[in-house]
Image: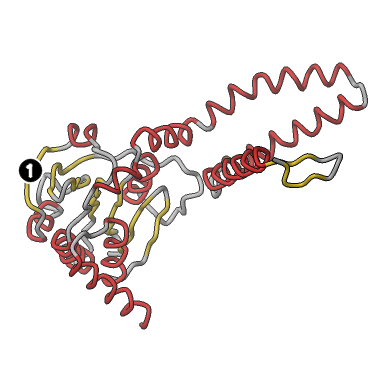
Amino acid sequence: MEILPLGFLEFGLKDLVETLIIACVILLLYRWIRGSFAVPVVIGLLIVFIVNATVSLFGLSTINWVLRRLLDVGILAVIIIFQPEIRKLLYNIGQNTTLYKFFDRGGSFSVIEEVVEAVKTLSRTRTGALVVFSKGSPLNDLVDKGVELDARVSSELLLTIFNRETPLHDGAVIIRDNKIVAASAYLPISQNPNISSVFGTRHRAALGISEVNDVLVVVVSEETGRISIAHNGALTSGLTIQKLRYEMQKHLGDADSSDAELTSFRQSELESN
């Protein structure tokens, strides 16, 4: 079935489907590397390909041979350079996070409120904190390396854990299935060179775990008390308590209709301010 019967150009339904698939792949690749150091690498590879095509056109066989050898080595180099991004992509595919979100109820309103209350105090007293919400990732490796717990989420417990005088304060709290499953867990540090120098190890750790796992991380700065969240390799800093509550409900979800109505109310309240 031809869509554009122009004689010299036969463009059918099959061609349309293939074009849409290729366009979607290119869009996903762009979103994947956007804002990372991979962009200049891709530009560099495109330049090499263009130069190689040009020397081939003019019959410069020696230069063409050298460029082809460079491209052969470049394939291996690209795999090494993009290793973190490739690992993240394969991990997300393996986790099948879309299905997980469909069946998962996410964090309940009470858990979000307990964390928000704790963060309010932690921010006021400038007590550093890292709280990781496991969404589509079990984080078993982090739980095993931390101090395993099985406790109900409460603001009092979180304040106790992050108290500077307790041995568990230096590390992250892992929340999974609305329970605190680990404390003093150490997170992988992000290697992204574009992270601002104003962010310290705690924020880099939040970014690092969000780059390779489906998580939401709440961060409280020990130096300034500033509240931040990390999600999908992006850091949002300088949140108010109201904005933090809204972002947590948006990312973690809520199944009860009453909670959904409260979320909608608070969202409209934020937009009006």
User: Which residue is located at x 40 percent, y 43 percent?
Assistant: 211
- Residue 177 is situated, as x and y percent measured from the top left of the image, at 16, 47
Please indicate whether residue 247 sits to the left or right of residue 145 in the image: right
Number of disc labels:
1
User: Which residue is located at x 25 percent, y 47 percent?
Assistant: 103
Please indicate whether residue 248 sits to the left or right of residue 25 in the image: left
Helix, strand or loop under label 1? strand
Q: Quadrant of residue 91?
A: top left
Q: In this view, does 236 lie above or below 52?
A: below
- Residue 69 is situated, as x and y percent measured from the top left of the image, at 72, 17
Name the residue that disc number 1 marks.
150
Say which of 94 and 140 sits in front: 94
- Residue 188 is situated, as x and y percent measured from the top left of the image, at 33, 38
* Amino acid on which the number 1 mark rests in the picture: Asp
- Residue 95 is situated, as x and y percent measured from the top left of the image, at 33, 36
Q: In which quarter of the image is residue 11?
A: top right
